[in-house]
Amino acid sequence: MARKTYQVIVRGRFAPLDAGQRAALLAKADEHEVFQARFTEEGTVTYERSLLAFTFRCLIPATEEETEAVVIGRAEALAAAAVSALGADHRDLRSVSTDLDNIKIRHRAHS
């Protein structure tokens, strides 16, 4: 069975936060700044101190038969779980995926 890997970026908004949730997220904000972002199978959550929105980056392995919609569904479920693990809820998820097997690498011509 052939395997593929998708790189998925899930963007979303935090659901309304109470004071305790805001304090907990702000306490961990340095661990979740954009410079910490990595594409891994576990995924990484990044957010700004405004606590309005977050970004989740992950790698999703898939079979040739799995559709992009299935892959995005799995990525969004991981994103929801990651945000929940931070003690918050989410809304308005939007995702974009890239099939890493279809990326063409262009080499610069040397003059």
Image (cartoon, rainbow, N blue to C red):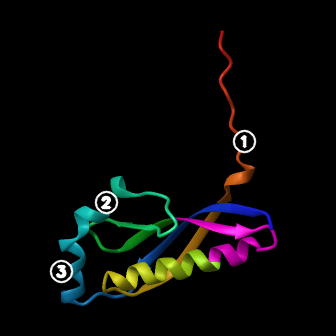
Cα gap from disc 2 to disc 1, whole angstroms: 29 Å
Front residue (pair 85, 33): 85
The quadrant holding residue 76 is bottom right
Magenta segment, which residues?
58-72
Q: CA distance from mark 3 to mark 2?
A: 16 Å
Quadrant where the image shows the C terminus: top right
The circle on residue 81 is: none
Q: Amino acid at mark 2?
A: Glu
> Is 107 rendered above or below residue 13?
above
Label 1 residue SS: loop
Instruction: Mark 3 and mark 2 in contact? Answer it, CB < 8 Å.
Output: no
User: Residue 38's spot in the image, x, y percent?
Assistant: 44, 57
> For the residue marked with disc 3, what is the amino acid?
Ala
Label 2 neighbour load within 10 Å: few <14, some 14-19, many 20+ = some
Q: Earlier in the sequence, mark 1 or mark 3?
A: 3
Residue designated by label 3:
23
Question: Residue at left 45%, top 83%?
Answer: 81
Residue 4: percent from the left, percent from the top?
71, 61
Residue ID for mark 1? 104
How far, Cα to Cα, is label 1 from label 3?
A: 44 Å
Element class at badge 3: helix
Q: Which residue is mark 2?
A: 33
Q: Reading the chain from its start, which is encountered first: label 2 or label 1?
A: 2
Q: Position of residue 34 (x, y in %)?
A: 36, 57
In magenta stretch: residue 27: no
Nearer to us: label 2 or label 1: 1
63 horizontally vs 60: left or right: right
Residue 98 percent across, percent down from the top left: 66, 58
Q: Which quadrant of the view contains residue 62?
A: bottom right
* Direction from residue 89 to residue 87 in the image, left or right: left
